Image (cartoon, helix red, strand yellow):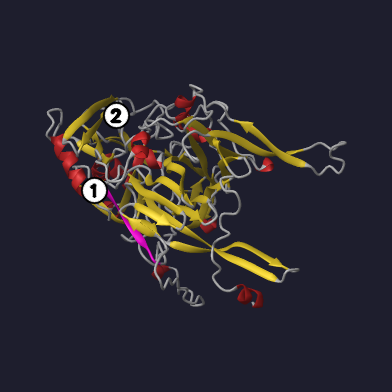
């Protein structure tokens, strides 16, 4: 690793320890406080862009504290370089992400509560240690126990054995309300007994029968090693370079993505991440109608990151990045192998067989993969950034894990859920992600255009009725840039730098291309989740860069009344012309669960592509070397 520091170097365990010590030494610190997070406070963009190699770096660390017995979040910024506290801001009435210690306390105390035990006995359950309890974010409905508290709603499931599928036997009808701050059960509600499903939903190898023996080994071999070079958290691969970051809520973050074009280093993305996501459920009943988890803001995708394993999660010649986080008492720890970096073959890059000239040229595509996987309760989310030799950048999200089920009476056919096994149904739901893309296409002054196909009416200029052309519309302000996808017109959005021109005197640009399912939220805008997840009402939002506008639903979505984040910021209708723009793209899946998704769902995919448009003068992958001779390809 290079000894010269960079402002975006990954946080270290030593920096966490120093930051916590500085905070603990401050007179304002309450020793009973809990650390929700300790993370690198990323320098403002101007600082990063102005940094010269070898120059001194002032490293700031941000911590979020929850004091005991108070409904507030305290944000503290310290300089571990200077050894000083820079700011101490109290956010009254704000609720941070759910805390692990409090959630564990909820599990213990719910099981001890006599009303919960009575509900279990009504269902013939006497061995309470066989019950799995999942605390859920409570949402915000303005009723019941929410006012003035940080609460969770706790659901119960039965396991015959510790290794059983924990979601195959939902204990339907029982919800426990837990006060996270006070550490007490507020109420246990029993909506009535539903028969326990008999199917255990087993999926471990011993339970599913003999493994297939008809697949031969498939090996990835790179005898000369990988093509990428890693220095600290800086990656260089072919023409690409970038930095790998990690955030407790966003998880994997990409910084300073640049393309090395001859002797020019050309910026494309300053920062890219998943800023927020929401999973709204479509069953209106009392057991499931309140479910609308914000898995980034209410739990933390980074806090739920997996340690990835060679041969299982990643294949090939791998470089791993560890992620440094902090426990709630403020102790540093590392998630080993949190981010995986391999290369993959990706089929044909370009090809032409010239019948007249007798030549046959084929180039193989490969891509660099940067990935991490988060387990949020029952679901797994894999986030895969791909860099291609032709200048494309892609984000693919892979959804798997176990659906959140409900028990149903024998023979029931629920309206708002699909039956997936005897006695088991899965409510209709959505997974909606918000990608924050701080584009700097050949520099920070960019403009945004919507491009869609326009059919030309039949007439003198179109006698055969076959003509169509692109219709280009500038998105000059924030309200104009609240846009949705339209597959019928091949709608995409182009970010251009008018001051930088290619050899054809066209402005250089990149376009955001919807490539997979792109739903918006189906819940009413006036609903609780509609107010809280306003970002999901549109596929595209564009804002001028502001360092404090980082999370699509605001910094504190847990039990928030709604309206924060993108709806609030864009109401100012700021100009987007020749400025430093940030694109926010909502994408995801609407999940009508199939029997094939049970007991563990095969991966479902969603995502998008950023593709160069006039960024290059011609195909930038012409110089990719053939893997075999042209004669060999022709002979084959």
Q: What residue is pinned by disc 2?
A: 149
* Relative side of 12 to 256, left or right: left
| Image vertical order of residue 336 relative to residue 552, above or below | below
| Residue 574 in picture, x, y percent from top left | 50, 23
Q: Nearer the viewer, mark 2 or mark 1?
A: 1
Residue 410 lies in the magenta stretch: no
**Residue 422 appears in view:** no
Towards the viewer: 468 or 192: 468
Magenta span: chief secondary structure: strand
Q: Which residues are magenta?
A: 317-324
Which residue is drawn at the image coordinates 64% and 32% (left, top)?
473
Q: Is 6 positioned to the left or the right of 317 in the image?
A: left
Residue 309 drawn at (x, y percent): 35, 63
The answer to which of 178 and 124 lies nearer the viewer is: 178
Q: Please state the horizontal and vertical placement of residue 184, each as a whole percent of the image.
A: 24, 36
Q: Quadrant of residue 552?
A: top left
Q: CA distance from mark 2 to mark 1?
A: 34 Å
Going by the image, does 565 lie left or right of 500? left
The front one of 454 and 505 is 505
Identify whether 544 is placed above or below 264: above
Measuring from the top left, give residue 541's x and y in whole percent: 52, 33
Circle 2 — which element? loop
């Amino acid at each position: 690793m290079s000894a010269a520091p960079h402002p975006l170097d990954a946080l270290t365990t030593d920096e966490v320890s120093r930051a916590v010590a500085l905070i603990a030494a401050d007179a304002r610190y309450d020793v009973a406080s809990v650390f929700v997070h300790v993370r690198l406070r990323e320098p403002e963009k101007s600082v990063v862009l102005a940094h010269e190699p070898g120059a001194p770096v002032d490293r700031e660390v941000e911590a979020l504290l929850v004091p005991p017995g108070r409904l507030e979040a305290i944000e503290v910024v310290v300089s571990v370089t200077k050894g000083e506290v820079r700011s101490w801001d109290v956010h009254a009435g704000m609720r941070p992400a759910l805390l692990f210690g409090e959630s564990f306390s909820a599990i213990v105390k719910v099981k001890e509560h006599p009303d919960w035990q009575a509900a279990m006995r009504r269902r013939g359950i006497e061995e309470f240690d066989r019950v799995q309890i999942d605390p859920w974010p409570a949402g915000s409905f303005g009723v019941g126990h929410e006012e003035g508290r940080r609460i969770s709603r706790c659901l119960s499931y039965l396991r015959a054995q510790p290794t059983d599928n924990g979601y195959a036997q939902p204990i339907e009808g029982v919800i426990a309300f837990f006060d996270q701050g006070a550490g007490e059960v507020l109420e246990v509600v029993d909506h009535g007994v539903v028969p326990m499903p008999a199917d255990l939903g087993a999926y471990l190898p011993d339970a599913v029968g003999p493994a297939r023996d008809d697949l031969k080994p498939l090996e990835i071999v790179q005898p000369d090693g990988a093509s990428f070079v890693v220095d600290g958290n800086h990656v260089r691969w072919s023409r690409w370079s970038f930095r790998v970051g990690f955030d407790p809520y966003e998880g994997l973050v990409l910084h300073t993505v640049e393309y090395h074009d001859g002797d020019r280093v050309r910026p494309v993305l300053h920062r890219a991440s998943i800023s927020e996501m929401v999973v709204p459920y479509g069953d209106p009943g009392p057991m499931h109608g309140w479910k609308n988890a914000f898995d980034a803001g209410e739990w933390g995708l980074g806090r739920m990151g997996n340690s990835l394993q060679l041969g299982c999660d990643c294949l090939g010649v791998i470089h791993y990045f560890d992620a440094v986080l902090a426990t709630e008492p403020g102790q540093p720890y590392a998630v080993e192998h949190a981010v995986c970096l391999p290369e993959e073959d990706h089929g044909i890059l370009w090809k032409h067989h010239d019948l007249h000239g007798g030549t046959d040229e084929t180039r193989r595509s490969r891509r660099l993969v940067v990935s991490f996987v988060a387990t949020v309760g029952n679901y797994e989310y894999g986030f895969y950034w791909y860099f291609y030799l032709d200048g494309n950048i892609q984000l693919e999200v892979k959804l798997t894990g176990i659906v959140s089920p409900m028990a149903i009476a024998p023979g029931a056919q629920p309206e708002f859920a699909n039956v997936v096994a005897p006695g088991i149904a899965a409510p209709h739901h959505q997974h909606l992600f918000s990608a924050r893309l701080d584009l700097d296409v050949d520099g920070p002054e960019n403009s945004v255009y919507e491009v869609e196909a326009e059919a030309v009416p039949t007439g003198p200029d179109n006698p055969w009725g076959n003509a169509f052309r692109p219709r280009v519309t500038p998105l000059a302000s924030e309200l104009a840039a609240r846009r949705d996808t339209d597959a019928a017109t091949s709608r995409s959005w182009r970010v251009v730098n008018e001051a930088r021109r290619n050899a054809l005197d066209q402005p250089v640009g990149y376009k955001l291309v919807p490539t997979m399912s792109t739903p918006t939220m189906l819940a009413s805008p006036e609903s609780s989740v509609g107010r809280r997840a306003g970002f999901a009402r549109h596929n595209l939002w564009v804002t001028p860069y502001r360092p404090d506008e980082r999370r699509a639903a605001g910094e504190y979505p847990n039990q928030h009344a709604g309206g924060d984040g993108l709806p609030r910021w864009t109401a100012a209708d700021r100009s987007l012309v020749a400025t430093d723009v940030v694109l926010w793209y909502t994408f995801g899946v609407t999940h009508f669960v199939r029997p094939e998704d049970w007991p563990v769902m095969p991966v479902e995919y969603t995502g998008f592509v950023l593709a160069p448009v006039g960024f290059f003068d011609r195909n930038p992958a012409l110089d990719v070397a053939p893997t075999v001779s042209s004669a060999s390809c022709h002979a084959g």
